[in-house]
Image (spheres, rainbow, N blue to C red):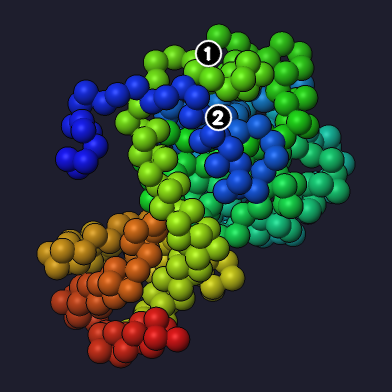
Amino acid sequence: MSDLGWNPLHGVPSYPAERYAALADRIGRLLRSRGDILLVQAEAVVALEAAAVSLARPGLAALNIVTSLYGGWFGQWLRRGGATVADIVAEPGLPIEIDAVAKALDAGSRIDVLALVHAESASGILNPLPEILALARDHGIVTVVDAVASVGGHEFDVDDLGIDIAVIGPQKALGGPAGVSALSVSRRAWDFILRDGAPRDSILSLADMKSWVDSGRFGLPGTPAPLEFFALETSLDRIEAEGLENVVARHALAASATRAGLAALGTPVWVPAAKASNLVTAVPVPEALAPAVLITAAGRLGVELTEGVGTAPARLVRLNHTGPRATFQTVLSNVVAYGAALSQAGHLADISAASEAISSAYSR
């Protein structure tokens, strides 16, 4: 820290205005997007709400896929702006079925916008994004994708997939700060946003953010938050040095090793590998056991496990192997702690076999 020449918690120097454009370009390359990259000085939920607010207006028809509370919020924001929204709600804690999406799109009603979350950190599931986007393209629909828990953990190519608006936050697989986020916006999405009196003079206005793009991407509107942008630069330096494909591979290995360890432990996982996120692995808690009991027992061993969010009536515990946690040491400690917690609660758990399975996965 002494090499910085300033205390990182106060007295932070201004972030150089000419570096915002370079930062946006680096994010564009990360997303493989030729669209406009907008920088938002807030956590990614704000960027998601900005997308909804900027699209929503009376006469807009949206199909909203709900696989967690985040999808539910997006639908609420669209409705608040006057849009007509049809929600497709998945089984609690599970990915959406592609047949349900196809049925909704083929029902005959006009749909302008389709929105969904790709990877769900709430339940450790992965929605079938390429298949959904292919259906949307066939119907000429503008797409909005929450990629906060997928970029860096899964293959994600905005242009190849044809995503019109992608929202990311660097705090998960990228291992960056939570106080800044970004959007990729296509030309087709701008046509929707800017027509018919787009919302203006608001921190949630993408139309106002486009003024920053059109004016040369120099200084961001509002008071800059330099600490978050310095931190974002550092995390991008780290990602670029490792190589994005290696970051994705590291998360995929952490996920597969976790699943191998749990299988050897004698514990089922929540969803099969093809439907699972690479960032979080969820396990269903045995009957008559409260998730909090297992989480507390693991905590006494110094390992943080968490409960599934927004997945009732599913009772899930999540093993987190996201960002800097996508390592052998964390995967091993997660599974061993979960096994120890099960053993303390009177359930069989072969911790030795689990450890060997994880070691074998990483040895390969």
Q: Earlier in the sequence, mark 1 or mark 2?
A: 2
- Could you tell me which quadrant the C terminus lies in? bottom left
Residue drawn where x is 16% and y is 77% of the image: 344
Which residue is label 1 attached to? 202
Q: Residues within 10 Å of mark 2 (few under 14, many from 20)?
A: many
Residue drawn where x is 41% and y is 53% of the image: 238
Residue 299, picture quadrant: bottom left
Residue 176 lies, with reference to residue 328, above or below; the image says above
Which residue is label 2 attached to? 21
Residue drawn where x is 85% and y is 44% of the image: 139
Q: Secondary structure at mark 1?
A: loop
Residue 314 lies, with reference to residue 193, above or below; the image says below
Q: Which residue type does callout 1 highlight? A: Ser
Q: Which residue type does callout 2 highlight? A: Ala
Q: Secondary structure at mark 2?
A: helix
Q: Which residue is more in the foreground, 112 or 243?
A: 243
In the drawing, does residue 40 fall left or right of residue 192? left
